[in-house]
Amino acid sequence: MERRPHKEIELTEGALYATEARYQEILDNAPAIIYVKDTDGRYRLINRAFEKVYGKRRDEILGRTDHELTGQTFADAFRAYDRRILASPDPVTEEHSVPSHDGRPLTLLAVAFPLRDADGSPHAVCGIATDITERKNAEQALKESEQRYRHAVSQADAVLYEKEYGQRRFTYVGERIFELTGYRPDEFSQEIWKEMLEETIMRGEGAGLTMEEVIEKTERGELREWRADYRIRTRSGETRWLADSSIQVYDENGTLRGALGILQDITERKNAEETIRWHAHHDMLTGLPNRVLFLDRLEQALSAAERRDRSTAVLFLDLDHFKHINDTLGHDAGDRLLQQIAYRLRDSLRPEDTIARIGGDEFNVLLPLVTGPDDATQVAARLLEALRPPVMVNGHDLYIGGSIGISLFPQDGGDPHTLLKHADIALYQAKGAGRGVYRLYAHTMNDAAVERLTMEKHLRRAIEQKEFVLLFQPKVEIATGAVIGIEALLRWQHPERGLLAPEAFLSRAEESGLIVPIDEWALREAARQAVFWGANDGPRFPVSVNLSGRQFRRPGIDALISETLAETGLDAHLLALEIKEAALMEAGESAGETLQALKRLGVGLSVDDFGTGNFSLPRLRRFPLDILSIDRACVENVHTQATDRAVVRALIELGHALGLRVVAEGVETQAQLDALRGLGCDAAQGHLIAPPMSADALSAYLR
């Protein structure tokens, strides 16, 4: 055998070493774990990634087995894996859980294959492993999250579902679908769903569309989400309401795949809404429609009558002397009477007619289609006849009649408001004719007279039904901002027109004399409120009340004030009376005597709305007044008009010369307040400081 020169051998070994070093460098820079084991399980080759897993140097690993490097459990598993690899013609892929050098559990995805000799015999195992610990942890967390979510959904009062648009089928339905519909998830289908549906109310983007239109639009991608309320008939025949909230679902390529939604049982809510709706449209005592429902039906009736060229009649019925029954037998008897009267009246009408109780002892009747006045008067006569027999209430035979006013569409009005107003006017005429009769509205009625009569009737009702309320507005000292008094302001809580200011009714109340009981009520109510405040750590400022001219001129006004103070227990110095400048002028010479009598009681006195009349200054000087209130008309342009500013300056100087405190009313802006401060005005009142408010709101404001 020829021997190679020594130098040639050295060169060959050097090249081999260099090649192995290059391969080792390549392996060490690979991110995957790479190793080679012999058939005895000893490591013959590893890379740097392998070292990091075990936390050992290469010389501590090479030549050792898994039994020497890990615990028995892991070593046995690895050895079994090696045997499967050596016996397999193909690479073997498995996941392995191994401990890292710091004790953390690692999950490795390994691909291993046998290294074979020239004759095909395996002599080693080569493996490549990737650390997939983070991915596995994420998958586990996702799985646990999904489990928690599904558990939460299953426990919630809702059903999660998934729908595929292509075949229009449910791919997933929550277990609670059985509770809602009576069908198990494996039975539930699009066909069954359609059979159950009785009514669909689309909401959100799908509002106004049919269910089929919503499905078509969502499949075309035109609706990304929608909501609906369904009324369904369950498998057992029960009616339920379900709320559906649905969003579109896309795959990873952005292709519309289907919808994900939640069904929730809203039957109780719907039933509650229906109950609320019924109460909102019906009178609680009689069960008859109320004014809201009556007006709605009247609107519909007018539209139908116009299309058919027919007439519609509106009747306004008021029971006669009902208040007397309430006063003598009590409100319980009155309520029972109203219930029985309601049944009688309803039974006297056709099914298509409507009778509504609009408050107290007043009823409206709608006759939707009549040929003319004769039809309406026949019904009115029948209703009055139904009232003639006595009504048995608590052992008493009660006789009660009624009066009816009638208006007709289109001749007496083309809208509900006008028809009701004219029926009310006709009712007032019927009452004036002796009661127990009906009257048709006539255009010959004097509008002004009818308006006065109607207002008087409503004012009387307001007094009887206690519809008046008091609001309170503070007066503040301009220099300090401190509250120095509170004015009680009368308002009318009208059942139809809402909260009315005095301008809307005081003149009619004065003309009719009804202002007297209204004034007396306001006086007592303000005094009671002041006493209540004093006993409950509330405001302790003088409360001022307006006296009308008619009340101020009545004999014995001082006795009324004295009785009120004694009845309520209010200290006289906490009550102030405001009398308008015009009322003092109308009272003539008696004004001074009346004011002196009131002053002896110890109450405060104020001349209100000063600056709007031509009151005699010498007479004013003789009156025992405390406050002069400048009318809002003078204050309105005090900051912009030199003339107005001069007038206000003169009024302030006059008040101060007479020893009076001057209060400016109707202060709405900071500019007005600044101007009044510059003119030396003492106090201000108006929306800038505080609007009129309820007693409770004033207490909170002052706190």
Image (cartoon, rainbow, N blue to C red):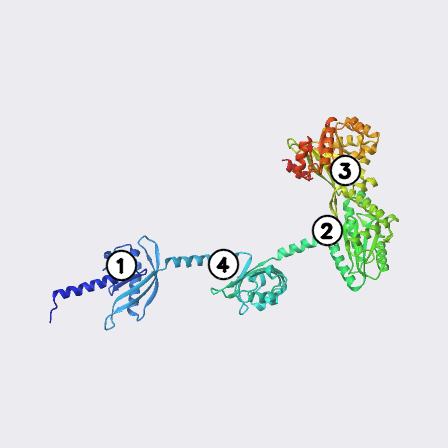
Q: Residue at x 31, y 59 (%)?
A: 74
In primary-sequence order, the first of circles 2 and 4 is 4
Q: Amino acid at mark 4?
A: Arg
Q: For mark 4, what is the residue? A: 150
In primary-sequence order, the first of circles 1 and 4 is 1
Name the quadrant containing residue 677. top right
Q: Amino acid at mark 2?
A: Met
Callout 4: 10 Å neighbours few (<14), some, many (20+)? some
Q: For mark 3, what is the residue? A: 521
Q: Is residue 405 left or right of residue 480?
A: right
Q: Amino acid at mark 3?
A: Trp
Q: For mark 2, what is the residue? A: 284
Q: Amino acid at mark 1?
A: His
State the separation of the CA atoms marked 2 and 3: 29 Å
Q: Quadrant of the N terminus?
A: bottom left
Residue 245 seen in this snapshot = yes
Q: Residue at x 25, y 62 (%)?
A: 22
Callout 1: 10 Å neighbours few (<14), some, many (20+)? some
State the separation of the CA atoms marked 1 and 3: 104 Å
Name the quadrant containing residue 306. bottom right
In primary-sequence order, the first of circles 4 and 3 is 4
Q: Secondary structure at mark 3?
A: helix
Of 61 and 331, nearer the camera is 61
State the separation of the CA atoms marked 2 and 1: 88 Å
